[in-house]
Image (cartoon, coloured by chain):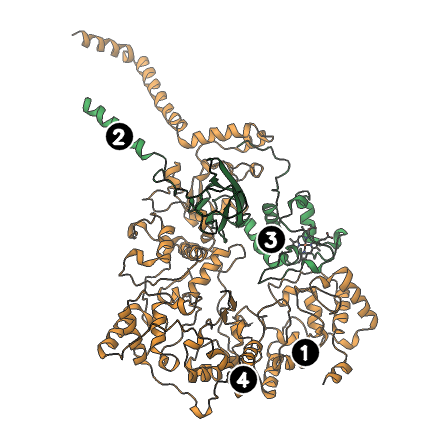
Amino acid sequence: MDLRRKVAAAWAFLFGDSARAFGTLSLVLVACLAVVPAKDHFREWSRYQTRYLRLIRQRGDAATLQRRFQPGLQQTWLPELGVVDRCTTCHVAMKETSLADVSTQPFRPHPAIPHSLNEFGCVMCHRGQGAATTVEEAHSSTKAWEQPVLPARYFEASCGQCHQNSLTGTPQLNLGRKLLARYGCVSCHALRTAGAARMMPTNEPPPLTHVARKTTREWIYAWLKNPQAYSVSATMPDFKLSDADARDISAFLIDQSTPYQQPDASKSSSAAADAQEGASVYGESFCASCHAVQNAAGLMVGGDVGPELTRIGSKVKPEWLGTWLREPKLYAPHTAMPRYRFSEKQLGLLAGFLEAKTDSDLLANVHLDAATKEQIAHGKALVNERGCASCHELNGIKKPDNFAPDLSVAGSRSLAKIVFAPGVPHTLPDYLAAKIRQPSAFGSALKMPQYNLTPVQVDALVTGLLAQTERAEAIPAVLRVAGTPVLKYDPAGKAGKLMQDMQCFSCHAINGRGGDMAPDLTWEGSAVQRAWLLTFLKNPNTLRPALIRRMPRFNLTDAEAQTLTDYILTAYQTPAFDADSLDSASFTAEDRERGRQLFYSKYACQSCHIVDAQNDKGYVGPTLTEIGAKGTPAWTFHYLKNPQLLRPGNIEPNQSMSDADARALTAFLMAQKKAPAQEAAKK
Amino acid sequence: MTRWHLTAVLSVLGLATNCGPKGAGPKGPEAKAYGAALVEVSGGKQVAAIGTTLDQPLVVQVNDAQGGAVAGAAVSFRAGGGATVIPPEGLTGNDGQLTVSVALGGVAGRYQVTAITRDKAGKTIEWRTEEIALGYQQNLGRQLNDRYCSRCHDPESTAERVSNHDNLNAKPHAFTDGAFLNNVSDADLTSIITHGGAALNKSPEMPPYGGTLGKADIEALMAYIRAVADPPYRLKGLVYASN
C-alpha cells in the first residue's frame, strides 16, 4: 500500500503536468547523449590521444603540433584500393617529422618512403585490420585473425604487390623472386603475377632422355640420395628417398634412356693427362665465369650459371664428356653451354683435366644389383608420383600440368585452410617459412622435396610469396608497374647461328634478351671499331682488371670472326647519333692537350680509369690504354655527354659535360693506342 | 552465491598463471666452467634491413685471466627493442666460442645486444655491441652505396670488390666515420654528392652524381650515411624526449 502511494507521488512529481514531463524527458535524453562521448573517453584510442597531447606539451614546437592534432576517430577511405584505415586514430604523428627522435609507439612519425600516406593508406603495406579501433583487433598478431600486421622482416613483400619489376630498394624481394625461378619452384607450382604471364624457371634441369650415356646408375643413385654430397651448390632438392626407392628410380632412368647422335669413337680424342696444361685450357677458356670448383679451403671459386665441377670426374663418362665439350647441343638442345670449337689437343687436355676431378668417397658404398622388371616399373611409378618430369625431360613421361598447388595468391592464403605442423606459430609467414625450410614436418606423405637453403634465402622466398596477394590482383591496372618482359629476340642468318652456338645471350643482353653478367651489346656496332672487334673476338683480352668473370676465347676461325664482326657492326647501331658524325682526323694536338688536362684535373678520370699504365692507378672502370683503337669517336663523345643514354643503369657518373669538353676529351682518348710502329714491331 | 564467487576466484587464478612471465620454464644450461673475460670474435656492428636476421652470426668468446679460451662457460644474451637472439643462451664450445644469430626489431635504429657470463665468484661479466637496422630509405641508400660509392669510400676490399681507396690522392671518408661526417651539415653533404668535389673546391676525384642519381636517391644515400655513422648521428635542433 505504502509502496504504491510512493510510486504515484513520484510519478506525479516527474510527469504530473506536461511541463514536468517535458523537463524529465529532456534530462533523460541529455544523459543518454552524454554516454556516447563518455564511452569514447574510456576507449583505448582516446587514452593514446591524451598521452600524445601530454608528450608534445614538453616539446619546442608544441603549439604547431597541437594545432595540427585532430582529436577523435580518424579514417582514410580509398574506395578504389579497398582501403578503410583508422590506424591514424592512435598513430597520430605519422607526418610529424619533428618527432623523429620519438621511439615510443604509437607516436613515431612514419619513416621516409616513396609514397604518400594519404594516397595508399596503411594496410596496403602493413596489412592488419584497418577498420578496427582497438590495438588488439587492428594488429592482431594472435592466432585466429586472418590478416595480422605483416612482420617487418617481410615488408618488401608489400612493394611487390604493385611492383613486378626489380626495385633498387627491395633487395630481399628481388632475391626471393629470383630464387623462385632459380630453384625451380615455378616448375611445379604455377605462379602468375597479376596481369602478367606465368613465371618461368631459370634453372636448366638437364634432359634425362639419354642419361645412361652421360653417367652411371651408381652415380644417379648417389645423387638422388644426397645431391649436396656431389655438389654443395646443387639446386636439385633432396626427395628423401629410401634406399629402395632410389634404387628403383635409378633403374628406371637408365632403362628409359635412349642413344643419341654421338660422333664415332675413332673421332673422339683421348683424354690427355697433363694437369698443368689442362688447367690452363680451363683457365683461358674462362670456364670459371660460369662453373665453380670448390677449392681446398672449401670455398667456391667461379660462377653459378652452369653446374659445379668439383667432382665431375666421378660423374660423367669419358665418351660423353668428349662429345659434350665438342658439341653440347647434341645432348641438350637448350643448354646455355657454348660450343667452344676446341682443337683436338685442347679437347684432350680439358677432358683429362676434368676427368681427374674425382671423389673416391662418393660412390664407395654404392652397390647395385642388376635391375629387375618390377624395380623398373616401380621406379617409373615413383618418377610419376614425385613429378620429376615437371623439371626434367624423360622418355615416355609427359610433363605434368600443375603438379603442385598454384601459388599465385599464396600471400593471401586463408589460415583456416592451412594445416599447421606442430610448433609452427599460426601465422601465414611462419607457415610459409616452415614449409620451405622443412616440408617433411608437415607430413611424410607430402611431395614437396627438401631444399638446402640459408635463412636469408628462406626469408627472401617467403617475401616473394607474400607479395602474391588477392589485393595485388585487385589493384587498379594504372598502379601496376610491369616487370621487364622477357623478349624473344633471335638474330638471323649465319651470325645468328654463331651467336647461338657461343651462347652470347647467357652473359650479354641484346634487344632486351639475355643475361647481365657482361655488357649490353644492343648498340655495340656504334661503339667499337671494326679492327678492334675482329681481334677481340678472336682473342679476348681483359678489359677490366677488377672483374673476376671474363669473356672466354671461343677459338673462332677468321671467317667466323669476320661474319660476326660484320653483323654486329651493321645490326647493332644506335639511332641516337650518326656513327660517322665525328672523325678522329679533325682533332688537333691542341684538342688533345686540352683533353689531357680535363682528364687529369677537371674530371679526374684517373681516379677510376688507367690511361697511362705507369702512373694511373684507378680500376673501377675499364682500362683505357687502348681506347683509341677500340672506341669510335662519335660513341666516345656521346658516351661522355650522357653515359646512361647508351647504357642504361651505367655507373659512370654523368658529368653534364659541355660539347667542347666532351670533344677535347674524345680527342685525348682517341690518341690512346699503341703507335703503329710499335705494333708492327711486335708482329 | 558462493558458487559464483568460487568461479570468479578460479578464473582470476587461471588468468594469473596464463600471464606469468613467458619462457620462465627451464633455465639455460648449467655452466661447466667459468671465465674472466668476454670478447667479440665477429658479428658486432653489422648493418641490415629492419626485421631481418643479420648476415653474419654473432660470435663471442670466453677467456680466462690469462687470455686462454674457456670451454663450457655459460653465456646468455639480451637484446633490446624487439631484437631477438637465437639461441638466447648456451655453453661455449671447445674453442671457447659461442655462435648465435641476431634478428633485428621492426623499427630502424640501433639495437644493443649484451652478452653476459659469470666468473667463478659469480660476478657478472658483460660485453655489449650495437647492430644497426635500416628502414626503407636507408636500405635503398645502402644499395646505391654498394653500386656507386663504396669502391672509393670503403677502404676494405672484398673477394667480389677491390677497393679503389688507395688509388686516390684525396682520401674519401668511410661513411661510418661519424667523427668527421656528423659535423658536416645535410646541405653540405647533399651539395658535394650532387655537384662533386670540384664544384666545392675539393678534389675532383669525387664525381658529381646530380646528373646520374635523382633527388630521392641522393636523399636515400644521405639517410644511409647518417644511419651507419659511428659515433651515432643525432638530428640537430630537436628537443629530445626522455623516452
Mark carried by residue B11:
2
Q: Nearer the viewer, mark 3 or mark 2?
A: 2
Identity, as a three-letter code, of the amino acid under mark 2:
Ser
Tell which residue pokes out farthest to the left in this image. A1
Decide: few, some or many residues near mark 2? Use Cα within 10 Å; few <14, some 14-19, many ≥20.
few
Q: Chain of mark 1?
A: A
Q: Amino acid at mark 4?
A: Gln
Please give the residue where the numbered disc 1 appears in the rendered image.
A529
**Residue corresponding to mark 4:** A346
- The answer to whether marks 3 and 2 sit on the same chain is yes
- The chain painted orange is A
Q: CA distance from mark 3 to mark 4?
A: 50 Å
Location of residue B29 in the rendering, given as x and y in whole percent from the top left corner: 38, 43
Mark 3 belongs to which amino acid? Asp
The span from disc 3 to disc 2 (Cα, nearest Å) is 57 Å
Quarter of the image where one finds residue A100: top right
The residue pinned by badge 3 equals B217
Q: Which residue is the extreme one toward the front?
A: B66
Q: CA distance from mark 1 to mark 4?
A: 30 Å
Q: Using the rendered image, report if marks 1 and 4 lie on a common chain.
A: yes
